[in-house]
């Protein structure tokens, strides 16, 4: 098993977070990283790891702002509108708003209609060297969820909501929650905007 292209945190960081010093559990941890990363990508409705989108067709919206499906934008290779190659620049055709993930049409609106815009671009939280550069809060939420899944796997408490003890006390578990409240507060900030 190895990490997929959609993995949000490296194995070494997870092992440090969990205080694991050997390679015994590497395969299981990679599976957990891949699984949790997929859950978070699905929840946020976007691919958070850097990906290149080639010849991606978008519907023109007739507005001056056109949101791209994934962001932050790390490289904009080309933009075509109704078959015509556009030029980036304040005195040209469009501007790129990298962090916000949209294109601004200079002095006019985007054509209205299905598949009027074709873009090739790169977006996501990874730099060119391959080092994952997630914002710190998003990385923390990812690590917290992985740690809970790891604890669940190690204790084998699958599906257990609570446990009674001889002294009458009851402990409840949040191990089966999709995301904890603290994680949700972070992940909500990274949900894909309605476009």
Image: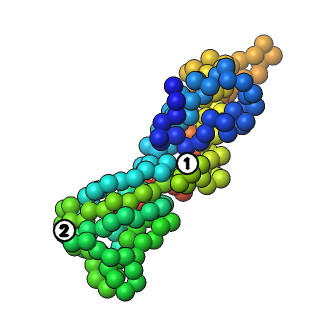
Nearer the observer, 177 or 130: 130
Q: Quadrant of the C terminus?
A: bottom left
Give the percent coordinates (x, y) of residue 4.
48, 36
> Is residue 160 found left or right of 45 in the rendered image?
right
Residue, x 33% and y 76% (percent of image)?
Answer: 87
Question: What colour scheme does the image use?
Answer: rainbow
Vertical order, 99 against 9 (above or below)? below
Res. 2 in view: yes
Residue extending furthest toward the front: 129
Q: Position of residue 126 (x, y in %)?
A: 54, 52
Disc 1 packing (10 Å; few <14; some 14–19; many ≥20): few
Element on which disc 1 rests: loop
- Relative image position of residue 174 (x, y in whole percent): 62, 32
State the residue position of label 2: 83
Q: Residues within 10 Å of mark 2 (few under 14, many from 20)?
A: few
Q: Residue furthest right?
A: 167
Question: Which residue appears at 37% of the width and 64% of the height?
Answer: 77
Across and down, in percent, residue 97 comes to 45, 71
| Earlier-in-chain disc, 2 versus 1 | 2
> Residue 120 falls in which quadrant of the image?
bottom left
**Taking the image as drawn, is residue 152 in sight?**
no
Image-quadrant location for residue 146? top right
Dot label at residue 76:
none
- Front residue of 90/116: it is 90
Q: Which residue is mark 1?
A: 130
Q: Are marks 2 and 1 in contact (CB under 8 Å)?
A: no
- Judging depth in this view, the residue of 44 and 171 nearest the camera is 44
Q: Residue at x 57, y 20 (%)?
A: 158
CA distance separating discs 2 and 1: 33 Å
């Amino acid at each position: 098993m190895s990490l997929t292209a959609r993995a949000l945190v490296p194995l070494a960081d997870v092992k440090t977070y969990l205080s694991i010093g050997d390679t015994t559990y590497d395969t299981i941890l990679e599976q957990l990283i891949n699984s949790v990363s997929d859950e978070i990508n699905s929840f946020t409705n976007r691919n958070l790891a850097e990906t290149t989108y080639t010849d991606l067709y978008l519907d023109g919206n007739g507005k001056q702002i056109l949101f791209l499906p994934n962001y932050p934008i790390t490289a904009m290779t080309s933009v075509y509108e109704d078959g015509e190659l556009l030029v980036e620049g304040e005195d040209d055709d469009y501007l790129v708003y990298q962090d916000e993930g949209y294109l601004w049409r200079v002095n006019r609106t985007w054509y209205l209609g299905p598949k009027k815009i074709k873009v090739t671009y790169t977006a996501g939280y990874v730099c060119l060297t391959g080092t994952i550069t997630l914002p710190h809060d998003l990385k923390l939420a990812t690590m917290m969820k992985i740690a809970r899944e790891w604890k669940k796997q190690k204790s084998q408490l699958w599906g257990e909501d609570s446990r009674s003890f001889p002294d009458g006390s009851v402990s409840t578990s949040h191990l089966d929650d999709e995301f904890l409240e603290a994680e949700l507060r972070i992940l909500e900030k990274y949900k894909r905007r309605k476009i």
